[in-house]
Amino acid sequence: MSKRIGFAGLGLMGSRMARNLLKKGFPTTVWNRTAERCEPLVKEGAKLARTPFELAEHSDVVVACVADPAAVERLVFAEDGLLGAARPGFRYLECSTVSPDTTRRVQAALREHGADALEAPVTGSKNGALNGTLLFMTGGETAVHEELLPVMMAMGTKAIHCGAMGQGSTVKLIGNSVISFMLEALCEGIVLGRKAGLSIETIVEVIQASGYASPYYAFKGAAIAKRDFEEHFAIDLLVKDQTLMLEQAAALQAPMPGLAAIREVFQAARAQGHGREDICAVVKALEKSAGL
Ligand code: NA7
């Protein structure tokens, strides 16, 4: 028998991930802070939960994909939170990108009720969520990873177990630090190149023919060339991750001077009103500084 799934958080990522679970035949119940966002999935066969508590009551596994640590706090620990319905055997799959401290705290609280959690932040953004090709990086018990693998494989194609609870979130934050550097470097190059009279296409063509080619440069370079800033992954959310990474860096006394500087460029883009645009809209902040 398929596990009964509860899905919390029907944003850009979660709505697409929940749809894949439904399509693969998992009995699915959904909850979202703004209840109207549940309507399309309910029309497609999902059940509706009024609270996270009710969601957990009707599910064997709750999958969460919410914005940030505050959202996880609300989902799990609020008076009507899912913790109240935790019981032996209940599982929580945390797909949001949050801090390792948050996922460890959630796991400890669930374990007091005989339940357990696996953190499984994802990469692949909107298209990966839509096509069911996400990569999961997990933290938690190996046995829980194995147990929840069929649920993850309904939404993605690969899951790498990174270690104990907290390690999945840490790897995810490292990954988002790396793409921050890659994207900001590309955007600085594009802005300078344009001032020097080069086309974006020529810059990207040379990068892609070189030893430092990456599908990421092709994807984001093409979007910038078309001025297509529709959200795949919002600047607000990347700044949230950069901040979580810098907090962890401070706690571990591991300086990240590059990331600290790059975050300011993304902060400038937010201040200019681009927070809900795709992360490649950071080019607009650099264009503005360069007088383009
Ligand atoms: P979105 O599209 O911004 O969606 C965020 C979701 O989180 C959405 O369902 C929100 O509900 C929910 N949310 C935000 N704040 C809260 C609080 N305080 N309480 C409960 N629910 C909340 O983000 P993405 O789908 O792109 O990304 C989701 C995660 O994956 C994030 O960690 C990324 O970094 C990776 P709403 O509809 O606004 O009521």
Image: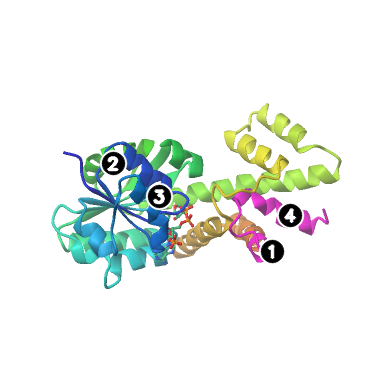
Q: Residue furthest front?
A: 43
Report crowding for label 1: few under 14, some 14 to 19, many 20 or more residues within 10 A (C-alpha): few
Q: Nearer the viewer, residue 61 or 213?
A: 61
Which is nearer the eye, 54 or 211? Answer: 54
**Mark 1 residue type:** Gln
Label 3: which residue?
40
Nearer to us of marks 4 and 2 is: 2
Picture quadrant of residue 134: top left
Q: Is residue 127 magenta?
A: no
Residue under label 1: 272
Label 4 amino acid? Leu
Which residue bears the numbered disc 2? Answer: 151
Instruction: Measuring from the top left, give residue 282's x and y in whole percent.
Output: 66, 53
**Pointers 1 and 4 in contact (C-beta within 8 Å):** no
User: Residue 286 has which mark?
Assistant: 4
Instruction: Please name the amino acid that badge 3 sits on.
Output: Pro
User: Of marks 4 and 3, which one's residue comes earlier in the chain?
Assistant: 3
Q: Is residue 107 above or below residue 171?
A: below
Q: Position of residue 139 (x, y in %)?
A: 32, 49
Residue 72: name its quadrant. bottom left
Is residue 268 visible in this depiction of the protein? Answer: yes
